[in-house]
Amino acid sequence: MTASDGLDYAPGELERDATFYVAGHRGLVGSAVVRKLQASGFENVVGKSSAELDLKNRDAVFAYMAEIKPKYVVLAAAKVGGILANSTYPVDFLSDNIRIQTNVLDAAVANDVERVAFLGSSCIYPKFAEQPIREDSLLTGHLEPTNDAYAIAKIAGILQTQAVRRQYGLPWISAMPTNLYGPNDNFSPNGSHVLPALIRRYDEAAKSGAPTVTNWGTGTPRREFLHSDDMADAVLHLMEHYDGPEQVNVGTGSDVTIREIAETIGGVVGFTGETEWDTSKPDGTPQKLLDVSKLADAGWTAQISLEEGLERTVAWYRDHVDNIRQ
């Protein structure tokens, strides 16, 4: 099997009856990928929960991969969290993610998996990368200290995917999404990313009639947000239309301030109080806007507006608030 290094090579439509393993199939991204694959006619989409298969257990991962013999794999499994979790438990985020990635990718090589999409995060890029961030900004500067351990793990995954291409000639790819949100997100107070944390905070304040909501930082950092269903659509599109060693940014190409997104969420949930900002807490990276030119060249653009995506996510959160991840 020989891989091309350019956009001119299209792998073509994936076989709908082949075994397709989604690692992390119950998470925010993985569950969206499963929904997309099933809606697109894939007949044999498989996955195991973390309780059923610990991806940090190398022998278990190899045994499972040998059992199911997938033709395609999306690696969406990861230990994830917001600023607080990343800065408090850097060892966990580095060690767990490297083990998960290495086990799944090594097992995929051992079982001749034809096509793999490794999913990372925009936090791989330098803290002060030129905006919007191009793919070639990788490894050109210092990382954001509050999530550098997670970022290093994801960078390792990109490099392993590239190494597989060089050593084995397999057409594996990497995709780096911007900030994602949607169904099955982590809405816990201490472990979630900014958008689900804000949804929970404002919804609880609206329901309780609280006069104020307090958010971390100054509210001035700018962030780009992509709905998980758009991400899933992009993943399948790239697997069928892109083959190159460089990771592909996946985003909308536009951003908003944290203050603006907080105000929008407050409006969606019906919060009528005041928002205060705890400036003693960290802001994180000043701006993270991805250059999505490579993605556009591959033929894909985001379809779900931020307003529509927020309304859908808030509705899902309210329907599942009693049994969401804590």
Image (cartoon, rainbow, N blue to C red):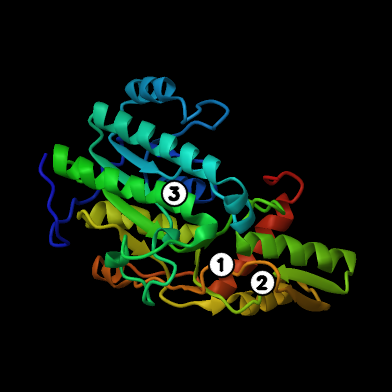
> What residue sits right under mark 2 in the picture?
217
Nearest the viewer among 29 and 79 is 79
Disc 1 and disc 2 in contact, CB within 8 angstroms: yes
Q: Is residue 307 above or below residue 66?
A: below
How far across and how far down the image is residue 289, in percent? Answer: 43, 73
Nearest the viewer among 228 and 283 is 283
> What residue sits right under mark 3 in the picture?
33
> What residue sits right under mark 1 in the picture?
284
| Direction from residue 171 to residue 275 in the image, left or right | right
Q: Earlier in the sequence, mark 1 or mark 2?
A: 2
Disc 3 and disc 2 in contact, CB within 8 angstroms: no
Secondary element under disc 1, as helix, strand or loop, is: loop
Q: Earlier in the sequence, mark 3 or mark 2?
A: 3
How far across and how far down the image is residue 1, in percent? Answer: 11, 39
Secondary element under disc 2, as helix, strand or loop, is: loop
How far across and how far down the image is residue 231, in percent? Answer: 43, 59
**Dot 3 alpha-carbon crowd within 10 angstroms: few under 14, some 14 to 19, many 20 or more:** many
Secondary element under disc 3, as helix, strand or loop, is: helix
Q: Calculate the distance from the C-alpha at mark 3 to the C-alpha at mark 1.
A: 29 Å
Identify which amino acid the numbered label 3 is placed on. Val
Q: Calculate the distance from the C-alpha at mark 1 to the C-alpha at mark 2.
A: 8 Å
**Dot 1 alpha-carbon crowd within 10 angstroms: few under 14, some 14 to 19, many 20 or more:** some
What residue do we see at 77% from left, 76% from top?
A: 276
What residue do we see at 56% from left, 67% from top?
A: 284
| Direction from residue 58 to residue 326 in the image, left or right | right
Identify which amino acid the numbered label 1 is placed on. Gly
